Amino acid sequence: MGTALVHGLLKAGWSRSCLRAVETDPHAREHARETLRIIEVLASPTATARTDVVVLAVKPKDTDAALDALSPFQWPDGSLLLSLAAGVSTKRLAVHWGTRPLARAMPNLAATIGRAVSALYATPASDEKARSWAASLLAAVGEVHWCAREEDLDAVTALSGSGIAYVLALMESMIEEGMALGLSQPLAERLVAGTVEATPALLAATGGDAAALSARVASPGGTTEAALRVLAEGDFSPLVRSAVRAAWTRARSLRGDEVVS
């Protein structure tokens, strides 16, 4: 995600001189230098008086080590720490970052193509300047939405953070059955992909009411109605909702004893 953000910022017109990457693992650092040839990749953090934002783009399990690496430096009081680590609360981040501005973001994998749907939360200590920095960074890889409550990021994780995998699971099943019905794999894949690509645009063009659009597609006694009946009999909607809730529950559990039932 850090690599995607760097590429997005450069594509958006940010100067490479404004950006530095840090990778403490030697092997990963060499890979990062090859991938991010256009910016400097350091072995350890370096604080400067002009450090406006520090982006924590690590896996949750690596967060403590990354924060330990940041702690020895005297970061400017107004510096923003923007964390992309899922499930790591601002309370936990503040142990290392102190009272400086803090924000958490949950982008999704579509950031790699500049089409992410990201949600942001900033602590009350984060002023408008810090919030603007956070939003402008994430805007470089897609659309940005704000959450009023930090716990809402768990639901964001369950919907957009994990949601690409749900859509892919549906697509895979449709493609497999299309092939079972005699279509070639390339044709089945293109038909399903084209349908999935067009659906959001069609929904937006027709007013944004998913139920109404579905009813338009499902003519009484027709093929779509027959398929939707099978999905209903198989508890499709409750199953999807249960899957989303499972992701939400897991996101909450990453916060450990910070979660209050």
Image: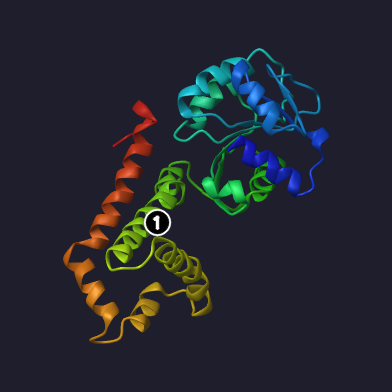
For the residue labelled by badge 1, is the local secondary structure a helix, a strand or a loop?
Answer: helix
How far across and down, in percent of the image, does residue 117 sit? Answer: 54, 53
Asked if residue 42 is positioned above or below residue 133 in the image, the reply reads above
Q: Which residue is located at x 35 percent, y 28 percent?
A: 256
How far across and down, in percent of the image, does residue 220 sit? Answer: 25, 87
* Quarter of the figure with residue 26: top right
The furthest residue to the left: 233
On the question of residue 128 being in view, the answer is no
Asked if residue 228 is positioned above or below residue 59 in the image, the reply reads below
Image quarter (top left, top right, bottom left or bottom right) of the C terminus: top left
How far across and down, in percent of the image, does residue 78 sit? Answer: 72, 31
Image quarter (top left, top right, bottom left or bottom right) of the N terminus: top right
Residue 260 horizontal side relative to residue 124, left or right: left
The furthest residue to the bottom: 220
How far across and down, in percent of the image, does residue 198 sit? Answer: 50, 71
- Residue designated by label 1: 167
Q: Which residue is located at x 29 percent, y 56 percent?
A: 240
On the question of residue 102 being in view, the answer is yes
Relative to the observer, which residue lies in front, 32 or 116?
32
* Quarter of the figure with residue 181: bottom left
Residue 261 horizontal side relative to residue 152, left or right: left
Residue type beneath disc 1? Val
Residue 171 horizontal side relative to residue 9, left or right: left
